[in-house]
């Protein structure tokens, strides 16, 4: 086993098509030992196909998949040191919990004493100690998910692949399992590769997030980097809510957008036409001023921990999250600090490209 933090798996220039449809284009990234890495993106972006290539269920048209430096392309799925947990769990209804978890060990003709020891340890790890004699159809969705994970980890893989495993759970149980999965990964000390379209799941659990769109990687980074420093408008819009506007930047540390000039912390690009991202929670509402950015409150929705307000200003609708409520129809001023303004290269797919010009 490689040392923690070093590259365990590498995808190099992976391409894949189904018929005339290209689903992956030049996919390249490394997965470190003991890392929780998440493939994030909308349906059809290629994340599950990438996972299936890692598992050995699909073969790329070109490129390579390397495990500890050696190619996996000719290694069948059952010989790879990875196991997969599927969204629908794929449990056997005619077997009890113990035998579901023991299934892979029995296929390998593992001695009975070793089977019992490893199954008991796996059930204890997923907090199902004492559930071995239960039938799977007597289990809740969260418990079945734990059984599926126990069945995967009992074979002691170096990498666990999880394909939207929380998708069948209700919101409360899904949030609980997010924390449990991250704790489980730390306890097991193995690498998790997780597929989801849920931004909150990715931000909550991941060490590294890979954002995908139409078979192309858009950004790789930590949750903090991806949220605070999105590389393009798609990432900014997909990871949480964003206000995205077109702007113009002709000098360092100064930008013009929404009809006003603002100080910022970025340096100018080769192309002065840029996109500007400001997160809703970074905007402060105040009394309107003659020279400032002003608007009128179009709607107010209570979200539990904050109010979500839509502010109309010169043809653009701002989203603002605040614990302070402004009345619908009120005239307000909008302010933000220079470090709250994130500048990106202009994207052809930018939602802000259809907003007000600089």
Image: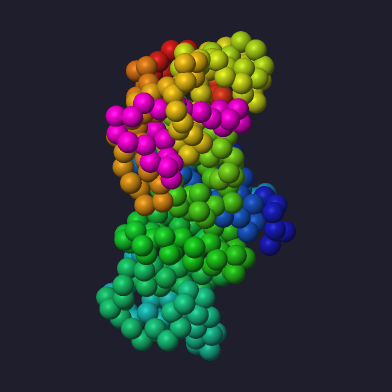
Q: Residue at x 55, y 21 (%)?
A: 345
Front residue of this view, candidates 92 and 282: 282
Up the image or down, 317 lies above or below 74; here it is above
Residue 238: tell me if it is visible: no
Q: Nearer the viewer, residue 354 or 347?
A: 354
Q: Residue at x 37, y 72 (%)?
A: 143
Residue at 36% over, 26% down:
331
Colouring of the image: rainbow
Does residue 37 appear in this view? yes
Q: Is residue 257 above or below residue 195?
A: above
Q: Residue furthest right?
A: 3
> In the image, what residue occupies the spot 32% across and 68% down?
141
**Which quadrant of the figure has residue 351?**
top left
The stretch of residues the image draws in magenta is 319-341
Quadrant where the image shows the N terminus: bottom right
- Residue 182 shown left or right of residue 165 in the figure: right
- Residue 100 is situated, as x and y percent measured from the top left of the image, at 38, 76
Residue 44 point in image, percent of width and height: 36, 39
Instruction: Estimate the x, y position of residue 212 in percent, counting from the top left.
Output: 47, 37
Instruction: Tell me if residue 51 comes above or below residue 212 in the rendering.
Output: below
């Amino acid at each position: 086993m490689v040392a923690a933090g070093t590259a365990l798996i590498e995808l190099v220039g992976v391409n894949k098509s189904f018929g005339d449809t290209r689903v992956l284009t030049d996919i390249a990234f490394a997965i470190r030992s003991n890392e929780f890495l998440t493939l994030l993106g909308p349906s059809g972006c290629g994340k599950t196909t990438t996972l299936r290539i890692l598992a050995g269920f699909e073969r790329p048209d070109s490129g390579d998949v390397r495990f500890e430096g050696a190619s996996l392309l000719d290694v069948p799925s059952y010989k790879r040191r990875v196991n997969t947990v599927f969204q629908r769990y794929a449990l056997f209804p005619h077997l009890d919990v113990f035998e579901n978890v023991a299934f892979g060990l029995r296929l390998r003709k593992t001695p009975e004493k070793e089977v019992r020891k490893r199954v008991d340890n796996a059930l204890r790890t997923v907090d199902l100690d004492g559930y071995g004699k239960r039938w799977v159809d007597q289990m809740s969705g969260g418990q079945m998910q734990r059984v599926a994970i126990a069945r995967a980890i009992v074979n002691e893989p170096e990498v666990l692949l999880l394909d939207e495993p929380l998708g069948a759970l209700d919101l409360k149980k899904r949030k609980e399992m997010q924390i449990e999965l991250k704790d489980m990964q730390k306890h097991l000390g193995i690498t998790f590769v997780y597929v989801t379209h849920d931004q909150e799941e990715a931000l909550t659990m991941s060490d590294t997030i890979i954002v995908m769109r139409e078979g192309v990687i858009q950004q790789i980074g930590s949750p903090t980097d991806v949220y605070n420093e999105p590389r393009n408008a798609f990432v900014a819009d997909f990871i949480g809510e964003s206000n995205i506007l077109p702007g113009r930047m002709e000098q360092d540390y100064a930008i013009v957008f929404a009809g006003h000039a603002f100080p910022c912390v970025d340096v100018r690009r080769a192309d002065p036409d840029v996109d500007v991202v400001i997160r809703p929670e970074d905007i402060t509402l105040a009394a309107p001023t003659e020279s400032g950015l002003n608007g009128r409150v179009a709607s107010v929705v209570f979200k539990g921990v904050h109010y979500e307000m839509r502010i109309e200003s010169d043809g653009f609708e701002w989203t603002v999250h605040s614990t302070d409520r402004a009345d619908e129809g009120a005239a307000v001023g909008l302010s933000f600090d220079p470090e709250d303004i994130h500048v990106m290269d202009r994207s052809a797919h930018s939602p802000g490209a259809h907003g007000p010009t600089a």
